[in-house]
């Protein structure tokens, strides 16, 4: 039993659309984990990722290169990337040979940004499933840009994509609103930040969309999408600013709770800390309120009130 427990490895599968900050997250999280005393191995699973800012323990480009695939098979970047993932799926013995010497490390997998890989294509899910059989316990960390909250239509799209990803990837899952320090660079939020992080009553979002002449014609479609999201009641978000240590710590606590690392044997943990993780006693609402005060400009009026005045 002791040998099996020692062989168990933990890690994060960092996923999300292009430009959401996955590589930057891997860099910041790896530095934070090393400061905590954890041995970290960052694995690049994105063959299109060039100029990596972090020390890479395993690089999928050693197995298959996106440029070579595009030239040889005359594929575009999207088709080439799908082929690369299928090629990796067919050669998982190469990946296992690379990961086995790193047992005892905490893994960060920097995954490709093609949305279809996480919503309906089977290669990446199959790779994660095989890793689970290798006793590698992963949490999917899904990053989306926080500025989508400023546009109700885009936020509904983000909710649908996040839900589809959660259902398809089939891993313990954490959704992050990345780049919180830039959240209001594209406009003001219509509601408080906790409305978006906790995905509260979305009917208010529909009313806000109805004020837009374009979306007014698609109200029934939006109502059905919102009903689907609320029926599953799975999606929520944790705000993240990768340059803020407190923000990274909140994310790490959620990840460790999701994949069971906080109950492992790698570190000395008190019963109090374990119980705190088990019951989620870090009061998420108060932390979200603090983040709102930190990154959002105070306003005496809501967006709706300002629109009414105009």
Image: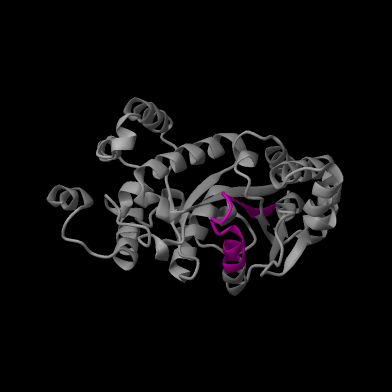
Judging depth in this view, the residue of 199 and 186 nearest the camera is 186
Magenta span contains residue 188: no
Judging depth in this view, the residue of 10 and 115 nearest the camera is 115
Judging depth in this view, the residue of 6 and 282 nearest the camera is 282
Image: 267 above or below 303: below
Q: Residue at x 78, y 45 (%)?
A: 84
Q: Residue furthest bottom?
A: 35
Pinpoint residue 310: horizontal percent, then vertical percent: 15, 51
Quarter of the view holding residue 119: top right
Q: Which residues are magenta?
A: 9-29
Q: Is residue 170 visible?
A: no
Query: 149 left or right of 277?
Result: left
Q: Residue at x 37, y 28 (%)?
A: 227
Quarter of the view holding residue 250: bottom left
Pinpoint residue 192: horizontal percent, then vertical percent: 27, 53
Query: 198 left or right of 123?
Result: left
Q: Residue at x 43, y 49 (%)?
A: 237
Q: Residue at x 57, y 49 (%)?
A: 17
Judging depth in this view, the residue of 245 and 222 nearest the camera is 222
Pinpoint residue 59: horizontal percent, then vertical percent: 77, 59
């Amino acid at each position: 039993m002791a040998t099996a427990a020692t062989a168990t490895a933990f890690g994060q599968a960092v996923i999300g659309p292009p430009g959401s900050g996955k590589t930057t997250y891997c860099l910041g999280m790896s530095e934070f984990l090393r400061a905590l005393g954890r041995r970290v191995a960052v694995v690049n699973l994105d063959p299109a990722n060039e100029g990596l800012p972090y020390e890479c323990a395993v690089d999928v480009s050693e197995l298959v290169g996106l440029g070579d695939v595009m030239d040889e098979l005359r594929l575009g970047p999207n088709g080439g990337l799908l082929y690369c993932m299928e090629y990796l799926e067919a050669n998982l013995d190469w990946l296992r040979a690379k990961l086995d010497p790193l047992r005892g490390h905490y893994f960060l997998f920097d995954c490709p940004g093609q949305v279809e890989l996480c919503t309906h294509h089977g290669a990446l899910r199959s790779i994660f499933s095989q890793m689970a059989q290798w006793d590698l316990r992963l949490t999917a960390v899904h990053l989306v840009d926080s500025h989508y909250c400023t546009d109700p239509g885009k936020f509904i799209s983000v909710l649908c994509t996040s839900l589809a990803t959660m259902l398809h990837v089939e891993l313990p899952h954490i959704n992050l609103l990345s780049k919180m320090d830039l959240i209001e660079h594209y406009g003001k939020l219509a509601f408080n930040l906790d409305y978006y992080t906790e995905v509260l009553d979305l009917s208010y979002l529909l009313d806000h969309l109805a004020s837009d002449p374009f979306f007014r014609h698609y109200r029934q479609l939006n109502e059905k999408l919102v009903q689907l999201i609320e029926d599953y009641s799975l999606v929520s978000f944790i705000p993240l600013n990768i340059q803020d240590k407190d923000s990274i710590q909140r994310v790490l606590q959620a990840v460790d709770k999701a994949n069971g690392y906080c109950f492992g044997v790698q570190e000395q943990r008190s019963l109090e800390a374990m119980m705190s993780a088990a019951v989620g006693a870090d009061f998420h609402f108060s932390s979200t309120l603090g983040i709102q005060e930190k990154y959002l400009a105070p306003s005496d009026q809501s967006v709706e009130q300002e629109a009414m005045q105009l």
